[in-house]
Image (cartoon, rainbow, N blue to C red):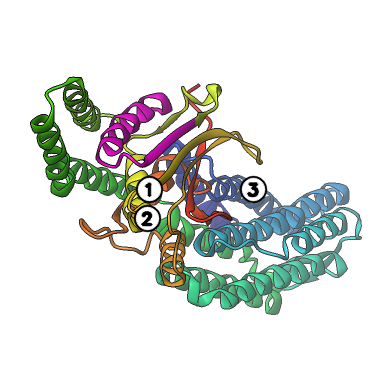
Amino acid sequence: MIRMEIACFLILGFIAFIYFLAGQKHTSLHKTFSMILIVALVHLVSDASTVYTVNHLDCVPVWLNDILHRFFIGTMVVVVYLFYRYISFLIEEETGKKMRLIWLANIVLFLAEVGAMVLPVHYAVTSQGNYSDGIHVSVIYISVTFYLTLCLGILVFYWKQINKKKKWMIMAALIVELCVSVVQAMFPTSLISGMGITLMILSFYLTLENPDILRGELTEQKLSMLYLKSQINPHFLYNTLDTIRIQAELNHDKETAEQLMHLVDFFRLSVKVDRQMVSLEEELELLDAYLELMCYRYPELKVSYDIAPQTGEVMVPNFILQPLVENSLLHGLKNKGYHGELKIIAKEHQGEFPAIEIQIADSGSGFDKATKEKIQDMLIHYREKEQKLEGNSIGVLNVQKRIKLLCGKEYGLWYTENENGGATAHMLLPMNGR
Protein backbone atom coordinates (compact mmCIF):
# COMPACT_ATOMS: atom_id res chain seq x y z
CA MET A 1 0.00 0.00 0.00
CA ILE A 2 2.94 2.33 0.50
CA ARG A 3 3.47 2.23 -3.26
CA MET A 4 -0.03 3.67 -3.80
CA GLU A 5 0.66 6.56 -1.40
CA ILE A 6 3.95 7.24 -3.18
CA ALA A 7 2.20 7.21 -6.57
CA CYS A 8 -0.50 9.60 -5.28
CA PHE A 9 2.18 11.88 -3.83
CA LEU A 10 4.02 12.01 -7.16
CA ILE A 11 0.81 12.81 -9.04
CA LEU A 12 -0.15 15.65 -6.67
CA GLY A 13 3.44 16.86 -6.56
CA PHE A 14 3.47 17.18 -10.34
CA ILE A 15 0.11 19.00 -10.32
CA ALA A 16 1.34 21.37 -7.59
CA PHE A 17 4.54 22.09 -9.55
CA ILE A 18 2.57 23.05 -12.69
CA TYR A 19 -0.07 24.95 -10.74
CA PHE A 20 2.30 27.12 -8.70
CA LEU A 21 4.64 27.64 -11.65
CA ALA A 22 1.74 29.03 -13.70
CA GLY A 23 1.13 31.79 -11.15
CA GLN A 24 -2.56 32.04 -10.27
CA LYS A 25 -4.55 35.10 -9.25
CA HIS A 26 -4.81 35.46 -5.48
CA THR A 27 -8.55 34.83 -5.27
CA SER A 28 -10.26 32.96 -2.44
CA LEU A 29 -10.84 30.03 -4.79
CA HIS A 30 -7.21 29.74 -5.90
CA LYS A 31 -5.86 30.28 -2.39
CA THR A 32 -8.05 27.44 -1.14
CA PHE A 33 -6.95 25.13 -3.94
CA SER A 34 -3.32 25.98 -3.17
CA MET A 35 -3.89 25.07 0.48
CA ILE A 36 -5.56 21.81 -0.58
CA LEU A 37 -2.47 20.87 -2.61
CA ILE A 38 -0.05 21.65 0.21
CA VAL A 39 -2.03 19.96 3.00
CA ALA A 40 -2.77 16.93 0.79
CA LEU A 41 0.93 16.44 0.06
CA VAL A 42 1.73 16.59 3.77
CA HIS A 43 -1.14 14.19 4.45
CA LEU A 44 0.12 11.65 1.91
CA VAL A 45 3.55 11.68 3.57
CA SER A 46 1.98 10.98 6.97
CA ASP A 47 -0.30 8.39 5.33
CA ALA A 48 2.64 6.46 3.90
CA SER A 49 4.46 6.71 7.24
CA THR A 50 1.53 5.29 9.21
CA VAL A 51 1.06 2.47 6.69
CA TYR A 52 4.59 1.38 7.52
CA THR A 53 4.55 1.97 11.28
CA VAL A 54 1.16 0.35 11.94
CA ASN A 55 2.39 -2.85 10.31
CA HIS A 56 5.62 -2.83 12.37
CA LEU A 57 4.21 -2.39 15.86
CA ASP A 58 6.86 -4.70 17.25
CA CYS A 59 9.77 -2.48 16.28
CA VAL A 60 8.32 1.05 16.10
CA PRO A 61 7.94 2.94 19.43
CA VAL A 62 4.32 3.42 20.46
CA TRP A 63 4.79 7.17 21.00
CA LEU A 64 6.08 7.59 17.43
CA ASN A 65 3.19 5.57 16.06
CA ASP A 66 0.71 7.69 18.05
CA ILE A 67 2.21 10.99 16.83
CA LEU A 68 2.15 9.90 13.19
CA HIS A 69 -1.44 8.67 13.45
CA ARG A 70 -2.61 11.89 15.12
CA PHE A 71 -0.94 13.89 12.35
CA PHE A 72 -2.52 11.59 9.76
CA ILE A 73 -6.01 12.05 11.23
CA GLY A 74 -5.56 15.81 11.69
CA THR A 75 -4.42 16.50 8.12
CA MET A 76 -7.16 14.25 6.72
CA VAL A 77 -9.81 16.36 8.46
CA VAL A 78 -8.21 19.60 7.22
CA VAL A 79 -8.14 18.34 3.61
CA VAL A 80 -11.83 17.38 3.66
CA TYR A 81 -12.68 20.71 5.32
CA LEU A 82 -10.80 22.55 2.55
CA PHE A 83 -12.77 20.56 -0.04
CA TYR A 84 -15.92 21.96 1.53
CA ARG A 85 -14.50 25.50 1.55
CA TYR A 86 -13.45 25.20 -2.08
CA ILE A 87 -16.90 24.02 -3.16
CA SER A 88 -18.60 26.73 -1.08
CA PHE A 89 -16.41 29.45 -2.66
CA LEU A 90 -17.22 28.01 -6.09
CA ILE A 91 -20.97 28.09 -5.40
CA GLU A 92 -20.71 31.62 -3.95
CA GLU A 93 -18.99 32.71 -7.17
CA GLU A 94 -21.68 31.08 -9.32
CA THR A 95 -24.70 32.28 -7.36
CA GLY A 96 -23.47 35.50 -5.75
CA LYS A 97 -24.80 34.27 -2.38
CA LYS A 98 -22.83 33.74 0.82
CA MET A 99 -22.85 30.29 2.43
CA ARG A 100 -24.52 30.36 5.84
CA LEU A 101 -22.96 27.34 7.58
CA ILE A 102 -19.29 28.34 7.46
CA TRP A 103 -19.33 28.91 11.23
CA LEU A 104 -20.57 25.36 11.83
CA ALA A 105 -17.89 23.91 9.53
CA ASN A 106 -15.24 25.84 11.47
CA ILE A 107 -16.52 24.56 14.82
CA VAL A 108 -16.48 20.96 13.58
CA LEU A 109 -12.92 21.46 12.31
CA PHE A 110 -11.80 22.75 15.71
CA LEU A 111 -13.45 19.88 17.60
CA ALA A 112 -12.09 17.27 15.16
CA GLU A 113 -8.54 18.62 15.46
CA VAL A 114 -8.73 18.63 19.24
CA GLY A 115 -10.06 15.07 19.15
CA ALA A 116 -7.28 13.97 16.81
CA MET A 117 -4.69 15.38 19.24
CA VAL A 118 -6.04 14.11 22.59
CA LEU A 119 -8.19 11.00 22.04
CA PRO A 120 -6.51 7.65 22.72
CA VAL A 121 -5.21 5.67 19.75
CA HIS A 122 -5.96 1.97 19.46
CA TYR A 123 -4.50 -0.52 16.96
CA ALA A 124 -6.20 -3.60 15.57
CA VAL A 125 -3.90 -6.50 14.64
CA THR A 126 -5.25 -8.91 12.00
CA SER A 127 -3.88 -11.55 9.69
CA GLN A 128 -4.60 -9.28 6.70
CA GLY A 129 -2.74 -6.34 8.17
CA ASN A 130 -2.88 -3.86 11.03
CA TYR A 131 -4.80 -0.60 11.27
CA SER A 132 -5.87 2.00 13.82
CA ASP A 133 -9.47 1.95 15.04
CA GLY A 134 -11.62 3.03 17.95
CA ILE A 135 -12.81 6.49 18.97
CA HIS A 136 -9.73 8.17 17.55
CA VAL A 137 -10.48 6.96 14.02
CA SER A 138 -14.15 7.80 14.48
CA VAL A 139 -13.06 11.44 14.21
CA ILE A 140 -12.31 10.82 10.53
CA TYR A 141 -15.59 9.08 9.73
CA ILE A 142 -17.72 11.64 11.55
CA SER A 143 -15.98 14.70 10.10
CA VAL A 144 -15.76 13.28 6.55
CA THR A 145 -19.45 12.35 6.67
CA PHE A 146 -20.32 15.82 7.99
CA TYR A 147 -18.39 17.72 5.32
CA LEU A 148 -19.53 15.50 2.45
CA THR A 149 -23.13 15.91 3.61
CA LEU A 150 -22.61 19.68 3.81
CA CYS A 151 -21.16 19.73 0.30
CA LEU A 152 -24.01 17.65 -1.12
CA GLY A 153 -26.55 19.82 0.70
CA ILE A 154 -25.37 23.16 -0.71
CA LEU A 155 -24.87 21.58 -4.14
CA VAL A 156 -28.46 20.30 -4.25
CA PHE A 157 -29.84 23.54 -2.78
CA TYR A 158 -28.19 25.70 -5.47
CA TRP A 159 -28.34 23.06 -8.22
CA LYS A 160 -30.31 25.14 -10.73
CA GLN A 161 -28.06 28.18 -10.32
CA ILE A 162 -24.72 26.44 -10.96
CA ASN A 163 -23.01 25.94 -14.30
CA LYS A 164 -23.86 22.49 -15.71
CA LYS A 165 -20.26 21.35 -16.15
CA LYS A 166 -19.26 22.50 -12.68
CA LYS A 167 -22.16 20.95 -10.78
CA TRP A 168 -21.76 17.54 -12.41
CA MET A 169 -18.01 17.63 -11.84
CA ILE A 170 -18.52 18.42 -8.16
CA MET A 171 -21.16 15.73 -7.83
CA ALA A 172 -18.91 13.11 -9.49
CA ALA A 173 -15.97 14.05 -7.23
CA LEU A 174 -18.13 13.84 -4.11
CA ILE A 175 -19.49 10.45 -5.14
CA VAL A 176 -15.95 9.14 -5.70
CA GLU A 177 -14.83 10.37 -2.27
CA LEU A 178 -17.97 8.93 -0.66
CA CYS A 179 -17.40 5.52 -2.27
CA VAL A 180 -13.74 5.47 -1.22
CA SER A 181 -14.74 6.42 2.34
CA VAL A 182 -17.35 3.65 2.49
CA VAL A 183 -14.86 1.05 1.22
CA GLN A 184 -12.27 2.26 3.74
CA ALA A 185 -14.82 2.00 6.57
CA MET A 186 -15.98 -1.51 5.53
CA PHE A 187 -12.48 -2.82 4.85
CA PRO A 188 -10.10 -0.98 7.22
CA THR A 189 -7.04 -2.81 5.91
CA SER A 190 -7.59 -1.47 2.38
CA LEU A 191 -5.95 1.87 3.36
CA ILE A 192 -7.17 3.70 0.22
CA SER A 193 -8.15 7.07 1.74
CA GLY A 194 -5.24 8.80 -0.01
CA MET A 195 -6.56 7.65 -3.38
CA GLY A 196 -9.91 9.35 -2.81
CA ILE A 197 -8.25 12.65 -1.94
CA THR A 198 -5.99 12.45 -4.99
CA LEU A 199 -8.91 11.73 -7.33
CA MET A 200 -10.91 14.69 -6.01
CA ILE A 201 -7.99 17.08 -6.40
CA LEU A 202 -7.28 15.73 -9.88
CA SER A 203 -10.90 16.30 -10.96
CA PHE A 204 -10.88 19.88 -9.61
CA TYR A 205 -7.58 20.62 -11.32
CA LEU A 206 -8.52 19.21 -14.74
CA THR A 207 -11.90 20.94 -14.92
CA LEU A 208 -11.57 24.16 -12.90
CA GLU A 209 -7.99 25.05 -12.04
CA ASN A 210 -5.98 24.04 -15.12
CA PRO A 211 -3.75 27.03 -16.00
CA ASP A 212 -3.94 26.21 -19.71
CA ILE A 213 -7.74 26.45 -19.64
CA LEU A 214 -7.63 29.75 -17.72
CA ARG A 215 -5.05 31.17 -20.11
CA GLY A 216 -7.19 30.03 -23.03
CA GLU A 217 -10.19 31.91 -21.63
CA LEU A 218 -8.07 35.02 -21.16
CA THR A 219 -6.72 34.79 -24.72
CA GLU A 220 -10.24 34.38 -26.08
CA GLN A 221 -11.39 37.46 -24.17
CA LYS A 222 -8.37 39.45 -25.30
CA LEU A 223 -9.01 38.63 -28.95
CA SER A 224 -12.68 39.47 -28.53
CA MET A 225 -11.80 42.80 -26.93
CA LEU A 226 -9.32 43.67 -29.65
CA TYR A 227 -11.99 43.00 -32.26
CA LEU A 228 -14.61 45.02 -30.39
CA LYS A 229 -12.29 47.98 -29.95
CA SER A 230 -11.48 47.94 -33.64
CA GLN A 231 -15.16 48.36 -34.49
CA ILE A 232 -16.21 52.02 -34.17
CA ASN A 233 -19.91 52.36 -33.44
CA PRO A 234 -21.18 53.96 -36.68
CA HIS A 235 -24.08 55.70 -34.95
CA PHE A 236 -21.73 57.40 -32.52
CA LEU A 237 -19.37 58.40 -35.32
CA TYR A 238 -22.08 59.69 -37.66
CA ASN A 239 -24.00 61.56 -34.95
CA THR A 240 -20.86 63.24 -33.64
CA LEU A 241 -19.69 64.27 -37.10
CA ASP A 242 -23.15 65.58 -37.87
CA THR A 243 -23.11 67.66 -34.70
CA ILE A 244 -19.73 69.09 -35.70
CA ARG A 245 -20.99 69.79 -39.25
CA ILE A 246 -24.04 71.69 -38.02
CA GLN A 247 -21.93 73.64 -35.54
CA ALA A 248 -19.46 74.52 -38.29
CA GLU A 249 -22.26 75.76 -40.54
CA LEU A 250 -23.76 77.97 -37.87
CA ASN A 251 -20.57 79.58 -36.58
CA HIS A 252 -16.95 79.15 -37.43
CA ASP A 253 -15.64 79.55 -33.94
CA LYS A 254 -13.37 77.95 -31.38
CA GLU A 255 -15.97 75.43 -30.25
CA THR A 256 -15.77 73.50 -33.51
CA ALA A 257 -12.03 73.16 -33.16
CA GLU A 258 -12.50 71.95 -29.58
CA GLN A 259 -15.01 69.31 -30.64
CA LEU A 260 -12.64 68.06 -33.30
CA MET A 261 -9.85 67.99 -30.73
CA HIS A 262 -11.91 65.89 -28.33
CA LEU A 263 -12.92 63.53 -31.11
CA VAL A 264 -9.30 63.06 -32.15
CA ASP A 265 -8.28 62.55 -28.51
CA PHE A 266 -10.95 59.91 -28.04
CA PHE A 267 -9.91 57.88 -31.08
CA ARG A 268 -6.22 58.30 -30.27
CA LEU A 269 -6.67 57.02 -26.72
CA SER A 270 -9.16 54.29 -27.58
CA VAL A 271 -6.80 52.45 -29.92
CA LYS A 272 -4.30 51.60 -27.15
CA VAL A 273 -4.91 47.89 -27.61
CA ASP A 274 -1.35 46.83 -26.84
CA ARG A 275 -1.89 47.01 -23.07
CA GLN A 276 -4.49 45.14 -21.06
CA MET A 277 -4.00 47.35 -17.99
CA VAL A 278 -3.63 51.15 -17.81
CA SER A 279 -3.63 53.62 -14.95
CA LEU A 280 -6.98 54.97 -13.81
CA GLU A 281 -5.70 58.43 -14.73
CA GLU A 282 -5.22 57.35 -18.37
CA GLU A 283 -8.62 55.67 -18.43
CA LEU A 284 -10.26 58.83 -17.10
CA GLU A 285 -8.51 60.86 -19.79
CA LEU A 286 -10.19 58.73 -22.45
CA LEU A 287 -13.53 58.97 -20.66
CA ASP A 288 -13.25 62.75 -20.38
CA ALA A 289 -12.67 63.07 -24.15
CA TYR A 290 -15.78 60.97 -24.78
CA LEU A 291 -17.95 62.90 -22.31
CA GLU A 292 -16.83 66.28 -23.66
CA LEU A 293 -18.26 65.22 -27.02
CA MET A 294 -21.48 63.99 -25.39
CA CYS A 295 -21.89 67.29 -23.58
CA TYR A 296 -21.68 69.12 -26.91
CA ARG A 297 -24.38 66.85 -28.34
CA TYR A 298 -26.53 67.06 -25.22
CA PRO A 299 -26.10 70.53 -23.64
CA GLU A 300 -28.38 69.62 -20.71
CA LEU A 301 -26.08 66.79 -19.66
CA LYS A 302 -24.03 67.54 -16.56
CA VAL A 303 -20.90 65.56 -15.67
CA SER A 304 -18.94 65.65 -12.42
CA TYR A 305 -15.95 63.74 -11.06
CA ASP A 306 -15.02 62.78 -7.51
CA ILE A 307 -11.69 60.97 -7.80
CA ALA A 308 -9.65 60.20 -4.68
CA PRO A 309 -6.03 61.31 -5.33
CA GLN A 310 -4.55 57.97 -4.21
CA THR A 311 -6.48 56.07 -6.89
CA GLY A 312 -5.00 57.80 -9.95
CA GLU A 313 -2.06 55.43 -10.37
CA VAL A 314 -4.04 52.24 -9.73
CA MET A 315 -3.95 49.92 -12.73
CA VAL A 316 -7.35 49.09 -14.23
CA PRO A 317 -8.43 47.10 -17.32
CA ASN A 318 -8.10 49.21 -20.46
CA PHE A 319 -11.30 50.66 -22.00
CA ILE A 320 -13.40 49.64 -18.97
CA LEU A 321 -15.30 52.86 -18.14
CA GLN A 322 -16.55 54.15 -21.50
CA PRO A 323 -18.90 51.18 -22.21
CA LEU A 324 -20.61 51.65 -18.83
CA VAL A 325 -20.95 55.41 -19.27
CA GLU A 326 -22.40 54.84 -22.74
CA ASN A 327 -24.94 52.42 -21.20
CA SER A 328 -25.91 55.07 -18.63
CA LEU A 329 -26.52 57.55 -21.43
CA LEU A 330 -28.38 55.27 -23.84
CA HIS A 331 -30.43 53.30 -21.31
CA GLY A 332 -30.68 55.69 -18.39
CA LEU A 333 -30.78 59.28 -19.59
CA LYS A 334 -32.15 58.77 -23.09
CA ASN A 335 -35.75 58.57 -21.85
CA LYS A 336 -35.22 61.93 -20.12
CA GLY A 337 -33.94 63.59 -23.26
CA TYR A 338 -30.38 63.39 -21.96
CA HIS A 339 -31.35 65.95 -19.34
CA GLY A 340 -29.63 64.88 -16.15
CA GLU A 341 -26.36 64.21 -14.41
CA LEU A 342 -23.56 61.68 -14.58
CA LYS A 343 -21.18 61.36 -11.66
CA ILE A 344 -17.90 59.42 -11.79
CA ILE A 345 -16.53 58.43 -8.37
CA ALA A 346 -13.31 56.56 -7.51
CA LYS A 347 -12.41 55.79 -3.90
CA GLU A 348 -10.69 53.24 -1.73
CA HIS A 349 -12.93 50.32 -0.78
CA GLN A 350 -13.05 49.32 2.88
CA GLY A 351 -13.04 45.52 2.86
CA GLU A 352 -11.04 42.37 3.52
CA PHE A 353 -8.37 43.23 0.94
CA PRO A 354 -6.98 46.46 -0.60
CA ALA A 355 -9.27 47.55 -3.44
CA ILE A 356 -10.81 50.56 -5.12
CA GLU A 357 -14.45 51.09 -6.02
CA ILE A 358 -15.42 53.05 -9.11
CA GLN A 359 -19.00 54.26 -9.36
CA ILE A 360 -20.83 55.61 -12.41
CA ALA A 361 -24.07 57.15 -11.18
CA ASP A 362 -26.79 58.62 -13.40
CA SER A 363 -30.04 60.43 -12.67
CA GLY A 364 -31.87 58.59 -15.44
CA SER A 365 -34.97 56.44 -15.51
CA GLY A 366 -33.41 53.44 -13.75
CA PHE A 367 -34.34 49.79 -14.43
CA ASP A 368 -37.66 48.14 -14.96
CA LYS A 369 -38.06 44.82 -13.13
CA ALA A 370 -37.36 42.62 -16.18
CA THR A 371 -34.22 44.55 -17.15
CA LYS A 372 -32.92 44.49 -13.58
CA GLU A 373 -33.35 40.70 -13.33
CA LYS A 374 -31.72 40.19 -16.72
CA ILE A 375 -28.66 42.27 -15.81
CA GLN A 376 -28.29 40.61 -12.40
CA ASP A 377 -28.47 37.15 -13.97
CA MET A 378 -25.94 38.12 -16.64
CA LEU A 379 -23.45 39.51 -14.11
CA ILE A 380 -23.71 36.49 -11.79
CA HIS A 381 -23.59 33.86 -14.55
CA TYR A 382 -21.19 35.78 -16.80
CA ARG A 383 -19.14 32.67 -17.64
CA GLU A 384 -22.14 30.93 -19.18
CA LYS A 385 -23.18 33.89 -21.31
CA GLU A 386 -21.97 33.76 -24.88
CA GLN A 387 -20.10 36.85 -26.03
CA LYS A 388 -21.97 38.60 -28.83
CA LEU A 389 -20.80 41.43 -31.03
CA GLU A 390 -24.04 43.37 -30.95
CA GLY A 391 -26.83 44.15 -28.54
CA ASN A 392 -27.47 46.49 -25.61
CA SER A 393 -25.77 44.38 -22.93
CA ILE A 394 -22.48 43.69 -24.69
CA GLY A 395 -20.66 46.45 -22.78
CA VAL A 396 -21.81 45.22 -19.37
CA LEU A 397 -21.03 41.56 -20.09
CA ASN A 398 -17.66 42.34 -21.62
CA VAL A 399 -16.68 44.54 -18.65
CA GLN A 400 -17.63 41.82 -16.16
CA LYS A 401 -15.73 39.12 -18.02
CA ARG A 402 -12.59 41.23 -18.38
CA ILE A 403 -12.55 42.25 -14.70
CA LYS A 404 -12.96 38.63 -13.57
CA LEU A 405 -10.23 37.35 -15.87
CA LEU A 406 -7.71 40.17 -15.48
CA CYS A 407 -8.21 41.03 -11.81
CA GLY A 408 -9.68 37.96 -10.10
CA LYS A 409 -13.03 36.44 -9.36
CA GLU A 410 -13.61 38.36 -6.12
CA TYR A 411 -13.65 41.60 -8.12
CA GLY A 412 -16.36 42.61 -10.55
CA LEU A 413 -19.32 44.74 -11.57
CA TRP A 414 -22.76 45.19 -10.04
CA TYR A 415 -25.63 47.71 -10.21
CA THR A 416 -27.75 49.43 -7.60
CA GLU A 417 -30.74 51.73 -7.96
CA ASN A 418 -30.53 55.28 -6.60
CA GLU A 419 -33.06 56.56 -4.09
CA ASN A 420 -33.71 59.68 -6.14
CA GLY A 421 -33.93 57.84 -9.46
CA GLY A 422 -31.41 56.42 -11.88
CA ALA A 423 -28.87 53.68 -11.36
CA THR A 424 -25.25 53.31 -10.28
CA ALA A 425 -22.70 50.93 -11.77
CA HIS A 426 -20.16 49.76 -9.18
CA MET A 427 -16.79 48.25 -10.07
CA LEU A 428 -14.52 46.66 -7.48
CA LEU A 429 -10.90 46.51 -8.67
CA PRO A 430 -7.63 45.54 -6.93
CA MET A 431 -5.49 48.25 -5.39
CA ASN A 432 -2.25 47.52 -7.23
CA GLY A 433 0.30 49.25 -9.42
CA ARG A 434 0.49 52.28 -7.10
Picture coordinates of residue 376 (x, y %)?
Answer: 46, 63
The residue pinned by badge 2 equals: 336
The residue pinned by badge 3 equals: 39
Q: CA distance from mark 3 to mark 2?
A: 58 Å
Is residue 15 depicted above or below 261 in this figure? below
SS category of the residue bearing label 1: loop
Amino acid type at image mark 2: Lys
Asked if disc 2 and disc 1 are in contact, CB closer than 8 Å, the reply is yes
The picture quadrant where one finds residue 316 is top left
SS category of the residue bearing label 3: helix
The picture quadrant where one finds residue 383 is bottom left
Which SS does the magenta portion mostly show?
A: helix
Q: Quadrant of the N terminus?
A: bottom right
Task: Characterize the local packing of mark 2: few (<14), some (14-19) or many (20 or more) Cα atoms within 10 angstroms.
Answer: few
Question: Who is closer to the viewer here, 196 or 249?
Answer: 249
- Whether residue 18 is visible, yes or no, is yes
Residue 43 belongs to the span the image colors magenta: no
Amino acid type at image mark 1: His
Q: Residue at x 57, y 73 (%)?
A: 155
Is residue 14 depicted above or below 282 in this figure? below
Return the mark for residue 339.
1
Which of the two marks, 3 or 1, is nearer to us in this view? 1
Q: Which residues are magenta?
A: 277-305
Q: Residue at x 24, y 32 (%)?
A: 270
SS category of the residue bearing label 2: helix
Asked if disc 3 and disc 1 are in contact, CB closer than 8 Å, the reply is no
Give the farthest residue toward the front: 250
Return the mark for residue 218.
none
Is residue 407 depicted above or below 96 in this figure? above
Q: CA distance from mark 3 to mark 1?
A: 59 Å
Q: Please report whichever mark, 3 or 2, sits nearer to the chain's N-terminal start.
A: 3
Amino acid type at image mark 3: Val
